[in-house]
Every structure is written in C-alpha cells, then in structure tokens.
Amino acid sequence: MRKITIISLFLLILLLSTNVFAADLIWRLTHGDQYALILGTVEQVDEGWIKVNVSKILNGKQVGKSIEIFADENRTIEPKFYWYVPKEGDFVVVSIDKDNSKYILKLGIRFHH
C-alpha cells in the first residue's frame, strides 16, 4: 500500500508540474537582447543622461567613441539609472538600446568607482 501511495504521489507531482521559461541576465546580455553592451568611463553627468567615453564594445553593434545615454523617460522612481547614481570618472558596463538617433539604457548599468 505504501508503495502505491508513493508512486501515486510521484505521478501527481509529475503531472502537476509545469515548465517555466525565463531569460537570465547573462543570456540576455550575451545574445543580442540589446543594441550594444559597452565598457566605458563616465565623462559628464546631467539630469536624465550621462556621457560615456566608450573603451570597448563587448557585444552588439558599433557606437561612437563618446555617446550620450539617456535614462528611461517613463521611470518615475529615482534614481533614473535604476539603483545607480552616476559620477564622473566611474567605469561602467552599460546595456543600451537605440531609439532613432539616441541611446537609451536597456537592461541596466554596472559601475566601479
């Protein structure tokens, strides 16, 4: 009887389980889910955008040597660059998208002072 109960419980769990599909951040960053992933230094900080001197394009399409990256205009929570408050001289890895002629923060920004 106990063996039948265990097998029944196992089959019930197997039948009720569902597949979950998710994209982890590493996959999204390395498989083209943004226009470009860049490494650079923050040159200038202004309200809602930062100017970055691009050292290297880690993934994606070519961008200029110095670009302005805008925060998400729809973001109402401060800071505009998610949890990051940019400072001049910071080294950053930034995921960007392109909207017409301007670059917009896509999946986030990682920094080192």
Image: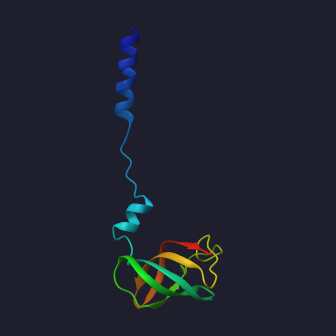
- Total labels drawn: 0
Q: In this rendering, would 105 be left or right of 84? A: left
Q: Looking at the image, which is closer to me, 80 or 9?
A: 80
Task: Determine the residue located farthest toward the top in the rendered image.
Answer: 1
> Quarter of the image holding residue 51?
bottom right
Vertical placement of 13 versus 35: above or below? above
Vertical placement of 94 versus 25: above or below? below
Vertical placement of 41 versus 9: above or below? below
Q: Position of residue 9 (x, y in %)?
A: 40, 22
Q: Position of residue 111 (x, y in %)?
A: 57, 73
> Quarter of the image holding residue 31?
bottom left
**Rendered residue at 55%/81% (across/down):** 71
**Rendered residue at 37%/52% (across/down):** 21
Rendered-image quadrant of the C terminus: bottom right
Q: Position of residue 78 (x, y in %)?
A: 66, 74
Q: Position of residue 35 (x, y in %)?
A: 38, 78
**Rendered residue at 37%/41% (across/down):** 18
